[in-house]
């Protein structure tokens, strides 16, 4: 049995020995302190809060040196989800906390409209002006004028070809979509962003990475265990606290991972 999870303290260096059993103070006070920090952490969404609070509860209120027992307690603390009996809430929540970059407006299973240039103004439906009342014609005209295809002067047909654009400095990326008719455009844009994309760094993560801000463990191993074997941590580290915020801090050219101490046995490894 290796060491179970312990509290992490922001001010601790990576070489400070671990504290056992959640520290000297009463477990209840420790838990209240953690809960307070978690509720004030704007980065934590509903799922992250559920996960962080369960970790905090188990580590402060149910001290044990058995990792197996600790993970059993974690599952109890998170609770079952009766609507999704066959999903594993712990796995799902840890996967949700894996450090990663999420591009803006990412939707799964859908594609964005074509951003190729529009030649003629978009009209919602062809209509014969003389068959509409004047107020209806004015309304229709207003709606058409405010349509994104006209305000942004883009084609707006369903996207078919997509082009990746990476930003220099942050490595953040987004997809540009083009329809079949604007295929040539897609090829040109792809050529235009080629050098920029090749020079761009790995994207700075903007999601997940909260567990390592609060608790100490071999997080790379844990994230990998609950996601997939080939999962690799970002070069900026697994801790959301360590990620640079573009525009606010200079982006340091960080080497690999910050050292993590205190391994943890995985419940079924
Ligand atoms: Zn188009």
Image (cartoon, rainbow, N blue to C red):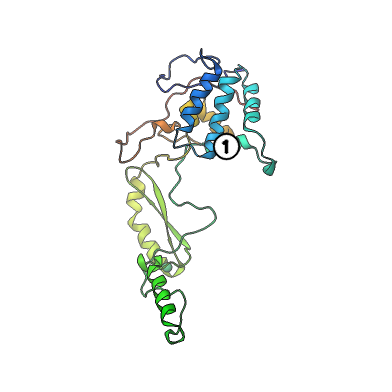
Residue 4 is drawn in which quadrant? top right
Q: Ligand 1 appears in which quadrant? A: bottom left
Q: Position of residue 91 (x, y in %)?
A: 60, 36
Q: In the image, what residue occupies the spot 36% across and 60% down?
A: 189
In the rendered image, the vertical position of residue 37 relative to residue 251, given as above or below: above
Q: Give SS at disc 1.
A: helix
Q: In this orientation, which residue lies closer to the viewer: 182 or 244?
A: 244
Work out whether 82 lies above or below 194: above
Give the image location of residue 33, x and y in percent.
Answer: 48, 23
Which sits in the foreground, 21 or 253?
21
Callout 1 crowding tier (Cα within 10 Å): few <14, some 14–19, many ≥20: some
Location of residue 206 in the rendering, given as x and y in whole percent from the top left corner? 43, 40
Q: Is residue 133 above or below residue 211?
A: below
| Residue that label 1 marks | 93
Can residue 67 be seen from the camera position used here?
yes
In the image, residue 256 above or below residue 26:
below
Q: Residue furthest top?
A: 24
Quadrant including the N terminus: top right
Can you tell which quarter of the image residue 113 is in?
A: bottom left
Is 131 displayed left or right of 71 in the figure? Answer: left
On the question of residue 217 being in view, the answer is: no
Residue at position x 54%, y 25% in the image: 56
Q: In the rendered image, which quarter is residue 204 located in?
A: top left
Task: Check the picture and name the quadrant holding the C terminus.
Answer: top right
């Amino acid at each position: 049995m290796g060491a179970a999870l312990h509290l992490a303290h922001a001010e601790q260096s990576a070489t400070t020995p671990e504290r056992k059993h959640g520290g000297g103070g009463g477990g209840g006070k420790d838990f209240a302190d953690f809960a307070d920090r978690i509720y004030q952490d704007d980065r934590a969404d509903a799922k992250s809060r559920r996960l962080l609070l369960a970790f905090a509860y188990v580590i402060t209120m149910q001290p044990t040196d058995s990792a197996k027992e600790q993970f059993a307690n974690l599952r109890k603390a998170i609770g079952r989800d009766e609507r999704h009996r066959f999903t594993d809430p712990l796995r799902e929540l840890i996967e949700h906390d894996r450090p990663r970059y999420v591009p803006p407006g990412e939707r799964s299973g859908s594609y964005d409209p074509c951003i190729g240039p529009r030649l003629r103004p978009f009209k919602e439906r062809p209509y014969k002006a003389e068959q509409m009342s004047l107020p209806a014609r004015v309304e229709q005209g207003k709606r058409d004028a405010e349509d994104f295809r006209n305000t942004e002067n883009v084609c707006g047909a369903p996207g078919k070809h997509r082009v990746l654009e990476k930003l220099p400095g942050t490595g953040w990326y987004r997809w540009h979509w083009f329809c079949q008719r604007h295929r040539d455009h897609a090829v040109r844009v792809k050529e235009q962003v080629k050098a920029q994309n090749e020079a761009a760094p790995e994207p700075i993560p903007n999601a997940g990475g909260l567990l390592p801000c609060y608790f100490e463990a071999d997080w790379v191993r844990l994230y990998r265990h609950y996601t997939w074997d080939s999962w690799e941590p970002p070069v900026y580290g697994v801790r959301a606290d360590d990620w640079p915020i573009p525009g606010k801090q200079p982006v340091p050219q960080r080497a690999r991972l910050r050292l993590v101490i205190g391994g943890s046995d995985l419940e079924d490894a």
